[in-house]
Amino acid sequence: MKRWRNLTLRGRLSVLTAAVVSVAVVICCSLAWFAAREQMNNQVDETLRQSWSTQGGIQSLGNWCSETRPFDRSQAVTTVITPDGLLCGGGDSAVKPTEADRAVAASGTFGHDAETTIHDGTTYGGTPIRVYSVSLGTFKINGQPTSLAVSFAQPLKPVHSALAQLGLMLLALALIIIAGAVIAAWYVARTGLKPVDQLTAAVEHIARTEEVGTTIEVSGKDEIARLSQSFNSMSTALASSRERQSQLIADAGHELRTPLTSLRTNVDLLVRSQDTGRALPPETHTKLLRNMKAQMGELSTLIGDLLELSRPTRPRGGTPLAVVPLHDIVARALDRARLRGPGLEFTVDVEPWFVRADAHTLERAVINLLDNAVKFSPAGGTIDVGLRFGTLTVRDHGQGIPEEDLSHVFERFWRSPSARQLPGSGLGLSIVAQTVHDCGGEVSLSNAAPGTLATVILPGAPTPPPELPSSI
């Protein structure tokens, strides 16, 4: 068992294939040998029966009792048997009667009802023979009624020699076939497992160099091909994930550098003023503190957004945590948006809709949409919010987004040139896209002339499922 476990997959497959073929060959050869033996025995039996039928009936005992002789140009010999043994004849070529032969002789039957027996036996000289005994009926010998039988015998040495030669031929053929099966099994295992070798080499290469994204060539549609396709998909996904991670780190570092540099500058001014004893004007001092506070808030927002984006995403179609009322989430998000845009007017048309999602992340996504609309709305403008049949729409009446920038709005840290002077990290819409995707929905952003229209479609129902409680 230990040696078996130490074998490679190719070795195990080769051994198993060769073993199965070997067993099949041995079984076939054995069946062929036994079938040939049965056929030869049947031919001998038929020859012995024909020896009796060609006698033309009962002849004189003198003919039967003549010296044991070859019969019908064959090696068959005849012997007359009584219930007590031989009537006549003898010698090394005579049949040595068995109990079955004596029983046939003692039956006294004749003609169509004559008792017969056929079996393997020997001569008095020890030669293996096939014996066919037939009852001859009852005769008077020396004035006494005596039942007799005649035995026809055929030597088995030619049959045994032919079977021995056939056995040797079958053995040689089996060995040749088994040897060929071993070679063929090794070749088939090597050819069939070649994609596995390529897959193993690719995995070892990734483990050694940590270079994800390596793929292997896929051919066919069998299980190995499916495994290769799955590996290629996994490797590509890992490479994409690492690339996104690297890009996120680079973008986060770039975004953090600006507020940190500003904070450091302001802190240096305050420390230098204190070290030199030159007090800053009160308005300058207050301005510096306000700038530091704003930069700290920007850093806190950026870090919160990064933590939100770095959380594990729930697989699409997975079981959500709870059933939540989207209309209530929109209402709470609107309360916060009104505080951030006190001079704006909100028109609301919201109908009940329940979705399966995480309440906290979904509320954050809706808040981000409304904050985005507040940020780009002109003073005294209007923001339209609607929720009908699972479709949430948020529209502002600002200047809109250039058509060439629409394809980038959901990318992390991306901001249009016109929005780079406004506060924000460029992660809000990325969080919206990720949250909506986790809920199994779709999100899009388009120009509405004037302004921008954000559309979120979430699967759900106007009433909560009875088996699950709603979560607020």
Image (spheres, rainbow, N blue to C red):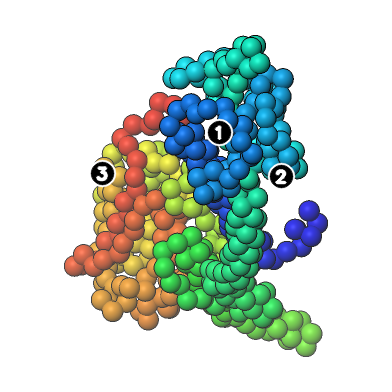
In the rendered structure, which disc, 2 or 3, sits on the residue that comes first in sequence?
2
Between circles 3 and 1, the one closer to the viewer is 1
Q: Which residue is mark 2?
A: 127
In the image, which is nearer the foreground, mark 1 or mark 2? 1
Where does the image place residue 458, in percent across and percent down from the top left? Answer: 34, 48
Q: Looking at the image, which residue is at 57% across and 72% down?
A: 187
Gap between marks 1 and 2 measured at Cα:
24 Å
Three-letter amino acid code at the position of disc 2: Thr
Q: Amino acid at mark 1?
A: Asn
Q: Is residue 124 left or right of residue 308?
A: right
Q: Nearer the viewer, mark 2 or mark 3?
A: 2
Is residue 321 in view from this perspective?
A: no
Residue at horizontal 54 percent and vertical 77 percent from the top: 214
Residue reaching furthest to the left: 449
Residue 32 in the image: state x and y as whole percent.
Answer: 54, 50
Residue that badge 1 annotates? 63
Q: Residue furthest front?
A: 142
Q: Nearer the viewer, residue 356 or 360?
A: 356
Where 206 falls versus 160 (above or below)? below
Task: Say whether marks 1 and 2 touch (CB < 8 Å).
Answer: no
Give percent across and percent down for residue 236: 50, 72
Q: Secondary structure at mark 1?
A: helix
Query: Is the residue marked by circle 2 packed among few (<14), some (14-19), or many (20+) residues within 10 Å?
Result: some
Do we see residue 411 in this rendering?
yes
Circle 3 sits on which residue?
Answer: 388
Residue 398, image quadrant: bottom left
Disc 3 versus disc 1: distance between alpha carbons?
119 Å
